[in-house]
Amino acid sequence: MTTAVLVHGGWHSASCWDLVRAELTAGGIRSVAPQLPMTSTLDVDAAVVRHALDSLGDDAVVVAHSWGGSPVTLGASGAPNVRHLVYLAAFMIEAGRPSLVDMRELPPMASVQIGPEVAVVNPEFAYDAFYHDCDPQVAAECTAQLRPFACAGWDRVETSVPPAWSLYPTTYVVCAQDRGMNPDAQRAMAAAAEAGEIVELDTSHSPFLSRPRQVADLIAERIRQYSAQPLNGLPPPSGKREP
């Protein structure tokens, strides 16, 4: 059996995956969704991802959303039970680099209030930025659960480990209507990292809310595909596993 490990993005909580997890459960697929603390540097959240993998007692297909791609890239690197990675509108960049830009260096913006220690999303702007194709009530519930993000989370972490996406078969899912992360930036990351497969969804930044069945089906398909293949141990750092 292979478990789906669902890693949320910045400001969000593990509960953002609840609709997808319900669909997976209905299809007989086990899932876990670790709660990232987002209170310190990237390596702290990466350790939470690694602990979740090490505690499974099972193989894993790991799904990372948005900023969650960076803790997965670092924390899943070298994990012997990973069969496949799915980057869902997620940062697919080098290990130890938290994001494409350090938001502390950007001009002030209305949607995110950045203080000396933490950054918080302005709830008035959350729907337009993250959830514009979602049911308003579902979006409101998710907005209410947004959490502060420690500014230290944008600090680069020095590491010698290879990025997880260089070790395992990988799917990148571009959200074509994304207002939180430019879809062209998503396509560029997927191309630069040589993702094995690139899929496009005509959704906002949050298809786990607007299209949970479609996201669950995508995950289930990869679980079926990669569970059917033997897991022969960790591949050499010089290349990805062949699908």
Image (cartoon, helix red, strand yellow):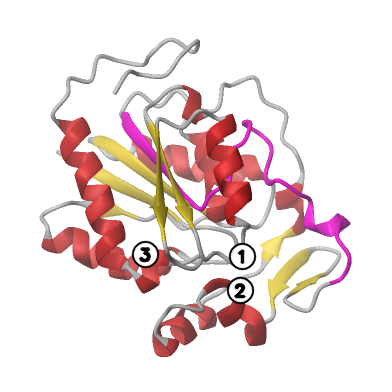
Pointer 1 residue: 180
Q: CA distance from mark 2 to mark 3?
A: 18 Å
Pointer 2 residue: 129
Residue 26 - label: none
Q: CA distance from mark 1 to mark 3?
A: 18 Å
Callout 2–callout 1 Cβ contact below 8 Å: yes
Instruction: Residue 201: give x, y in percent of width and height.
Output: 40, 58
- Which amino acid type is marked by label 2? Ala
Query: Does residue 67 appear to the left or right of 208 in the view shown?
Result: right
Query: Does residue 88 appear to the left or right of 3 in the view shown?
Result: right
Q: Secondary structure at mark 2?
A: helix
Label 3, residues with CA under 10 Å away: few <14, some 14-19, many ≥20 = many
Pointer 3 residue: 17
Say which residue appears at 29% left-offset and 64% top-offset. 20
Residue 88 among those drawn in magenta:
yes
Callout 2–callout 3 Cβ contact below 8 Å: no
Query: Sequence-wise, which precedes: disc 2 or disc 3?
Result: 3
Query: Sequence-wise, which precedes: disc 2 or disc 1?
Result: 2
